[in-house]
Image (tube, grey):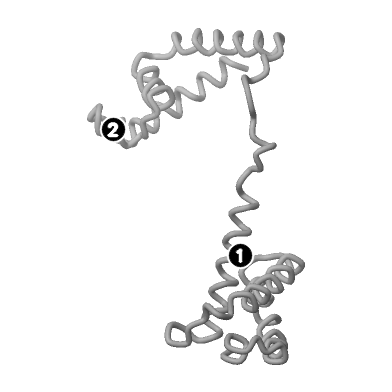
Amino acid sequence: MAAIRDRRDAAAFARLFDHFAPRIKGFLIKSGSEPGVAEDCAQEVMAICWHRAHLYDPARASVATWIFTIARNRRIDGLRRTRRPEPEDLPWGPEAEPDPEEALALRQASDALTEAMTRLPEAQRALILQAYFADRSQSEIAAQTGLPLGTIKSRIRLALARLRAEMT
């Protein structure tokens, strides 16, 4: 690595490339990358090693550690790029108006659910409201009401079954 860093020795870099490129590709494939992506990333890593050889400090890390750290960081960067939506994929402006038929169907379903909720026993209705409208966990509800967790679970299960039966 010193010859590459100090003299920009192309022959030394060729030997370094021949040694590390297949190992980097294998490392990336084992890390979950597709073979083609791993190949591209390995070549990119080796190009970075050539261009940034002057930054290598043998007192801080071995050559292998330095190169594999670059490979790991490139893989993480690639994963972040694939998970982040491109700006043109992001929605801009106001959302489109819903289809009138869909809006009507949604309103009717909402009204039917409201009506079905009124027919539930008060104990079950209160638990459904807390669990689904106040977004509380069953454990939180049990702590708040003082009822056993099993009772909370049973009442919610029975209430959902009743609502499902009325909504179909």
Q: Position of residue 104 (x, y in %)?
A: 66, 8
In the picture, the quarter occupied by the C terminus is top right
Task: Judge whether 140 appears above or below 167 on screen.
Answer: below
Q: Position of residue 80 (x, y in %)?
A: 59, 54
Seen as rendered, the residue at the extreme front is 7
Seen as rendered, the residue at the extreme left is 146
The amino acid type of the residue labelled 1 equals: Arg
Task: Judge whether 7 appears above or below 104 on screen.
Answer: below
Q: Residue at x 71, y 13 (%)?
A: 99
Q: Between 57 and 166, which is closer to the camera in this rendering? A: 57
| Secondary structure state at the residue bearing disc 1 | helix
Please name which of the two marks, 2 or 1, marks the residue nearer to the observer: 1
Q: Residue at x 61, y 8 (%)?
A: 108
Q: Residues within 10 Å of mark 2 (few under 14, many from 20)?
A: some
Q: Between 38 and 139, which is closer to the camera in this rendering? A: 38
Q: Between 34 and 7, which is closer to the camera in this rendering? A: 7
Which residue in the protein does label 1 denote?
75
Q: Residue at x 49, y 24 (%)?
A: 160
Q: Between 59 and 111, which is closer to the camera in this rendering? A: 59
Cα separation, mark 2 vs mark 1, equals 45 Å
Of callouts 2 and 1, the N-terminal one: 1
Q: Is residue 30 left or right of residue 137?
A: right
Q: Residues within 10 Å of mark 1 (few under 14, many from 20)?
A: many
| Secondary structure state at the residue bearing disc 2 | helix
Where residue 139 is drawn, which disc sits there? none
In the picture, the quarter occupied by the N terminus is bottom right
Which residue in the protein does label 2 denote?
142
The amino acid type of the residue labelled 2 equals: Ala
Q: Residue at x 65, y 86 (%)?
A: 8
Q: Is residue 97 left or right of residue 61?
A: right
